[in-house]
């Protein structure tokens, strides 16, 4: 595995590679969810590139960027053992300069749900993903469905800017008790980890209600909020794949989403129907 710490090193590593490039952008603290993305990239492409870059522009003032988990050595090992060809590990000065052009998230879809809780977050995500795509020039890029809104906005950016990359969404990976894997789970103590199960339990309830024929969003959201008590819920939402609010679940075009705080840790989860 080649570790490229600059765009020049990345270009050098990639210029000798032939065929398709599968790309998994990450912020490190890799877990089985990332492994699933890397494995898919490995199966479907000639070359696999993973980036690890804790992107400062997607953190809001007050969100503690310095506390984001960093595990360089373990992450490098995971990439190596997963058959990654090139690990792109740039530093902030290699990615950003002064007074730069930035990508703006769309006014509506970029500022609801996650975008309402974290205004400007998606500008940072889209800007760094655009930079990474232009550096890596992947054939396919792999993203988890857990960050559903991020996935929708990146897919939209690729369409709106006529970018030549296929976005491949993959299902959320869960612990055996239902907890969605997330780099933030490391912040949970054992009691909080139990509390965190309320998110997947609420989504399970939503699925059960729909399977029983209850499709009214209000009824489903009310039941979910009951299960989530006493967590500090940021939102429960039922939207279509274009992130428009739905008054009724439409099978094949619905995402049920939840964001809540467990202690000081903000968790998100969703289910696609
Ligand atoms: O999902 C993430 O880890 C990040 O938002 C991403 C896509 C790597 C951009 O920094």
Image (cartoon, helix red, strand yellow):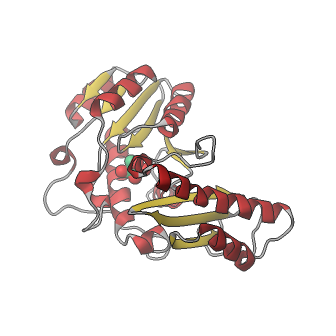
Q: Which residue is drawn at 56% across and 29% down?
A: 44
Counting labels gives: 0
User: Residue 106, can we see it?
Assistant: no
Q: In front here: 66 or 244?
A: 66
Q: Does residue 225 sit above or below 6 in this rendering?
A: below
Report the quarter where the C terminus lies: bottom right
| Residue at x 72%, y 72% (from the top left corner) | 220
Q: Position of residue 86 (x, y in %)?
A: 35, 26
User: Which residue is located at x 20 percent, y 42 percent?
Assistant: 91
Answer above or below: position of 55 versus 91: below
**Please, which residue is most extreme toward the front here?**
191
Q: Which residue is drawn at 49% across and 74% down?
A: 112
Q: Position of residue 260 (x, y in %)?
A: 50, 66
Q: In which quarter of the image is residue 243?
A: bottom right
Residue 98, percent from left and from top: 13, 59
Task: Specify the quadrant that holds the N terminus.
Answer: top left
Residue 211 visible (yes or no): yes
């Amino acid at each position: 595995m080649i570790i490229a710490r600059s765009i020049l090193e990345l270009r050098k590593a990639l210029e000798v590679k032939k065929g398709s490039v599968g790309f998994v952008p990450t912020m490190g603290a890799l877990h089985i969810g990332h492994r699933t993305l890397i494995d898919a990239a490995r199966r479907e492409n000639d070359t696999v590139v993973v980036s690890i870059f804790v992107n400062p522009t997607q953190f809001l003032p007050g969100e503690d960027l310095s506390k984001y988990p960093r595990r360089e050595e373990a992450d490098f090992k995971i990439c190596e053992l997963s058959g990654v060809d090139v690990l792109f590990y740039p530093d902030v000065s290699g990615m950003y300069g002064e007074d730069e052009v930035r990508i703006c998230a769309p006014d509506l879809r970029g500022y609801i749900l996650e975008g309402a809780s974290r205004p400007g977050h998606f500008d940072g995500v889209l800007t760094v993903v655009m930079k990474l795509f232009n550096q890596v020039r992947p054939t396919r890029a792999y993203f988890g469905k857990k960050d559903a809104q991020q996935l929708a906005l990146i897919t939209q950016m690729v369409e709106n800017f006529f970018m030549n990359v296929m976005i491949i969404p993959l299902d959320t990976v869960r612990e055996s008790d239902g907890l969605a894997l997330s780099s933030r789970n490391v912040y949970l103590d054992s009691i909080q980890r139990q509390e965190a199960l309320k998110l997947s339990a609420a989504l399970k309830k939503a699925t059960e209600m729909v399977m029983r024929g209850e499709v009214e969003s209000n009824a489903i959201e009310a039941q979910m909020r009951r299960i989530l008590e006493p967590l500090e819920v940021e939102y429960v939402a039922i939207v279509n794949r274009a992130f428009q609010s739905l008054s009724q679940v439409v099978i094949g075009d619905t995402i049920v989403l939840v964001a809540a705080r467990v202690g000081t840790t903000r968790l998100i989860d969703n289910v696609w129907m």
